[in-house]
Image (spheres, rainbow, N blue to C red):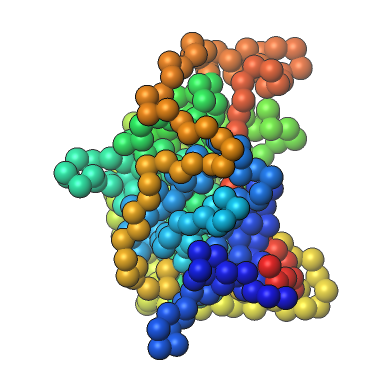
């Protein structure tokens, strides 16, 4: 099969992940004197590329990603299109696993995740969040980017021990001309929403910190923080914000670590950490007392490699494993060029958005809509509010480790 070439320079090598609306390929970009670099190529499926909201979020992911240069954030290299009008996001590639798969590798062995490794993951993720929250415009004014989808599968762990935050498709940048979220819509993975967002309030950096606290709680306990038979019941649990004591589930954890995570999970955003930077500093101080880890990054990389080997062995033995492939988007070096994106991409067959957004329809309070749905007989969200628990249109589910397909 002839290799597919995108934008005259990106060769698609094999399929890496498949989602409802998007596909990720392993790709290679080649240059002079035998230069080559492995990249991840993310593409919206053809049947969805004419739907403006999906294109808008894809363009936003490219715009935000190209503007966030930090060692703990997956770098966006390029954003391009082909002759048929399909859009491609070119990103970094890593040898490693996502945090969700890393946790699963331990759970399937009946083992608890080593807490120093999880703390190291938290520190790296929070540094990436801090860079997004503290983003500045060229004139020096602060223009925060709120991730809004902090979850295990959006935290990548490299075999070199470097932690990367990825998937800013739902991110809210404060310099955006108009919002991509319709009135009355709550976006983000259901189980990682903060109580205030579940009430229809605006997401803030403290909302991301709640998501990070949820990730750490689950990574250490091996359980779901909010778990119920139905999404509606999970929604109620989030709003009540009743947190089970982590120290009882993991008695081996340092008390100060339990306290730090519980602080991030406070119901009132004002009671959480004032910033991701402060939370990262607190975790770093706790990690200093971990005598078992002389070099946290090196130890994390070794642990990721071992976890990956266990998953590969199980896959080869015929076991069913839902894991990342052996390479995913991440840092492979500094970006050589600055990517400049157009303010708005056009979609073939779809009229361009006017420069001045139309007057929005009357806003119905998300809180009132959710309350009405929950209090109604049978407790249904149907017909009252559109809760987008995730970005199924842009997220990518990993392929089994044994699956390798040509594009």
Vertical arrangement, residue 309 with respect to residue 407, above or below: below
In which quadrant is the N terminus drawn? bottom right
Residue depicted at x 37% and y 55% = 66
Left or right of 5 on screen, residue 342: left
- Most extreme residue toward the bottom is 33
Vertical arrangement, residue 46 with respect to residue 378, above or below: below
Q: Looking at the rendering, which quadrant does residue 317 occupy?
A: bottom right
Left or right of 334 on screen, residue 7: right
Residue depicted at x 59% and y 47% = 394
Vertical arrangement, residue 220 with respect to residue 273, above or below: below
Residue depicted at x 48% and y 74% = 29
In which quadrant is the C terminus drawn? bottom right
Query: Residue 305: percent from the left, percent from the top?
Result: 56, 77
- The mark total stands at 0
Foreground residue among 363 and 9: 9
Residue depicted at x 70% and y 63% = 399
Query: Residue 178: percent from the left, percent from the top?
Result: 40, 29
Is residue 320 in view from this perspective? yes
Foreground residue among 86 and 267: 86
Is residue 392 in view from this perspective? no
Query: Residue 110: percent from the left, percent from the top?
Result: 70, 65
């Amino acid at each position: 099969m002839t290799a597919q070439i995108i934008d005259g320079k990106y060769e698609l090598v094999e399929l890496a992940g498949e989602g409802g609306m998007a596909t990720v390929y392993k790709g290679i970009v080649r240059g002079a004197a035998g230069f080559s670099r492995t990249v991840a190529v993310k593409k919206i499926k053809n049947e969805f590329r004419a739907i403006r909201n999906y294109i808008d979020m894809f363009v936003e992911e490219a715009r935000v990603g190209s503007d966030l240069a930090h060692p703990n954030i997956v770098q966006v290299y390029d954003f391009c299109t082909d002759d048929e009008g399909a859009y491609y996001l070119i990103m970094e590639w890593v040898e490693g696993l996502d945090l969700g798969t890393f946790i699963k590798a331990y759970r399937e062995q009946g083992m608890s995740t080593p807490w120093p490794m999880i703390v190291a993951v938290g520190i790296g993720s929070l540094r990436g969040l801090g860079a997004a929250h503290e983003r500045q415009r060229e004139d020096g004014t602060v223009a925060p980017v709120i991730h809004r989808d902090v979850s295990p599968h959006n935290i990548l762990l490299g075999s070199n021990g470097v932690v990367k935050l990825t998937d800013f498709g739902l991110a809210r940048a404060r310099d955006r001309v108009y919002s991509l979220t319709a009135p009355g819509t709550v976006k983000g993975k259901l189980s990682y929403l903060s109580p205030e967002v579940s009430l229809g309030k605006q997401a803030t950096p403290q909302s991301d910190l709640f998501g990070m606290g949820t990730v750490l709680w689950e990574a250490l306990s091996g359980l779901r923080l909010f778990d119920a038979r139905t999404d509606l019941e999970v929604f109620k649990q989030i709003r009540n914000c009743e947190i089970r004591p982590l120290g009882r589930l993991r008695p081996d954890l340092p008390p100060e670590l339990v306290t730090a995570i519980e602080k991030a999970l406070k119901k009132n955003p004002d009671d959480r950490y004032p910033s991701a930077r402060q939370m990262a500093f607190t975790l770093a101080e706790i990690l200093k007392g971990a005598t078992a880890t002389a070099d946290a990054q090196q130890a994390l990389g070794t642990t990721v490699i071992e976890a990956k080997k266990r998953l590969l062995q199980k896959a080869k033995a015929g076991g069913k494993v839902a894991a990342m492939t052996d390479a995913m988007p991440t840092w492979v070096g500094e970006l050589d060029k600055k990517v400049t994106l157009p303010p708005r991409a056009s979609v073939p067959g779809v009229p361009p958005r006017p420069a001045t957004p139309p007057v929005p329809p009357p806003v119905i309070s998300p809180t009132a809509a959710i309350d009405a749905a929950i209090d109604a007989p049978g407790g249904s969200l149907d017909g009252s509010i559109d809760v987008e628990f995730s970005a199924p249109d842009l997220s990518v589910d990993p392929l089994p480790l044994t699956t390798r397909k040509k594009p």
